[in-house]
Amino acid sequence: MAAPSSLVDTLTASGGAEPAGFLNDIVEQLWPNIRVYGANVTKETVEPILKSTLPAPLNNLKFTKLDLGSVPIQFSNVDVHKTTNQGIKLDMDLNWEGVCDIELDGSMVPKVGVERVHMKGRISVLLCPLINVVPLIGAAQVAFINPPSLTLDFTDAADIADISLISSTVRSTILGIIESMVVLPNRFLVKLDNNNDFFKTYQPHHGFLRVTIGKANGISAPKPGEKKSTMKRLMAKVKLEDVPDCYVKVKVGAGEEWKTSTVDNNHSPEWNETHDFLVADYEQHIFADIQDEDTATGDDDIGLGSITVKDILLNGGSHDLKLTHKGEETGATLSVHAKFYHLVADAQILSSASNTQGQGQGLFCGLATILIASALGLDGNRKELNPSVKITWGDKTFQTVAKTYTPGMDIFNPAFDQAFRIPLTADMMANPHHFKLSLMNKNSEVGSTELGFQDVMAAEGMVKEGEFEVGGGASVRARVSLFGVKEAE
């Protein structure tokens, strides 16, 4: 069965791929400046995360050298689209074969050098809103559509006993940072107009994808010589058949991971389990990772498969993923099914969907989106101000980045420009909470205000936005919006 015609039109809309010679010429000229800026941002961002996330002694690693080298990033295969909020979207491939001089050092850890960085991925550049004065574009937002591939070549690797551990740890940490900052739905925002309105800049999600994990065929335990848990090695020695106990980890892009139940002792496990995922771009991949469960010593990798949201929908909503392990096909397959649901600003649909669409664990009937643009009218010693905004909805809490005064910054009216999302289930809709916006200074609440869920739902377009007073003459500029869901036609 083919995808509905209107959805087909959306999925196949494209201006056609174009070369990026002009862009590469610009990047080449700017590269001396980009390498300095990139090195500073990398050091300021990565070092604190290494310290807070890695186990000792790796958490002592710091950059003693950080030069991104003279080889610039290359772009190709540019595709231009118009966005739903009347902006311009550029999709393009990124390839960087960086010849670098990077050195990490720390107490009780051997000095590690990185001489080459290999990074590939497809990025999305959003230019919006379009305005009638120079620079004609309010802001640019950059993101990888899916997590990029990253390989690091280390210097003197053969002389470092723990290079494998250090390499995998540093690489996974860097990829984790990239995912949290610049992989959809996360975007890196650069204001081109100082008066840019974040509410007009924000690009809403396209909708939900309802993914069902069906049946796998041809699943086998790890082959001789591959990683096996202690119990499975013991079983192999006494010649007992090693039948896998499989579950599937599923993600869309860099979104939240979902895990199926475990099917024991089966070479053709069948789940038929369903979960909903937010979709920010139709080129996002559905990633399926089958694992062989071992509660004693760690799970074994069985196979990986992926397909884009666009491709599975154009294929009628079903596809058999071919699974690979360490880059080689295993011969195993996994059936995946998908339905797409649009987000609609309709209170009646949201109310009715809570009785039909959101029944079942992991199934959504709507979405709440909270945009925090800025705080206004703060008071106090600017060097002692460390403002942020905290959002509370029932047991869910979110918080913007805390701002610190720097020369030229208006710390009394700080901009945050951050978005937070709450997928809604039928259980949540049965007794919805108020949205609480709290202005914080460090860890202390300065003031707060609440927006009733029913008040937002009754507002025009199910949107409440404005400068909401939180006390003491201060206010928070925010937008709270609700959406129902409707199956694509």
Image (cartoon, rainbow, N blue to C red):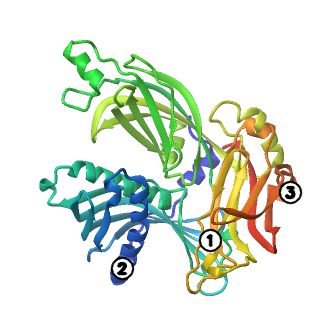
Give residue 14's position: percent from left, percent from top: 52, 60
In whole angstroms, how far apart are the C-alphas of marks 2 and 1? 28 Å
Of residue 444 and residue 167, the one placed in the foreground of this image is 444
Residue type of the residue flagged with mark 3: Ala
Of residue 406 and residue 11, the one placed in the foreground of this image is 406
Task: For the residues labelled 1 and 3, say whether their Cβ atoms are less than 8 Å apart.
Answer: no
Q: Nearer the viewer, mark 1 or mark 3?
A: 1
Residue tagged by mark 2?
36
- Mark 1, Cα crowd under 10 Å, few <14 / some 14-19 / many 20+, is some
186 up-or-down from 406: above or below: above
- Residue 204 seen: no
- Mark 3, Cα crowd under 10 Å, few <14 / some 14-19 / many 20+, is some
Residue tagged by mark 3?
459
Residue at coordinates 29% horizontally, 21% vertically from top-left? Answer: 231
Q: Identify the image quadrant of the N terminus.
A: top right
Task: For the residues labelled 2 and 1, say whether their Cβ atoms are less than 8 Å apart.
Answer: no
Give residue 363's position: percent from left, percent from top: 65, 36
Secondary structure under tag 3 reads loop
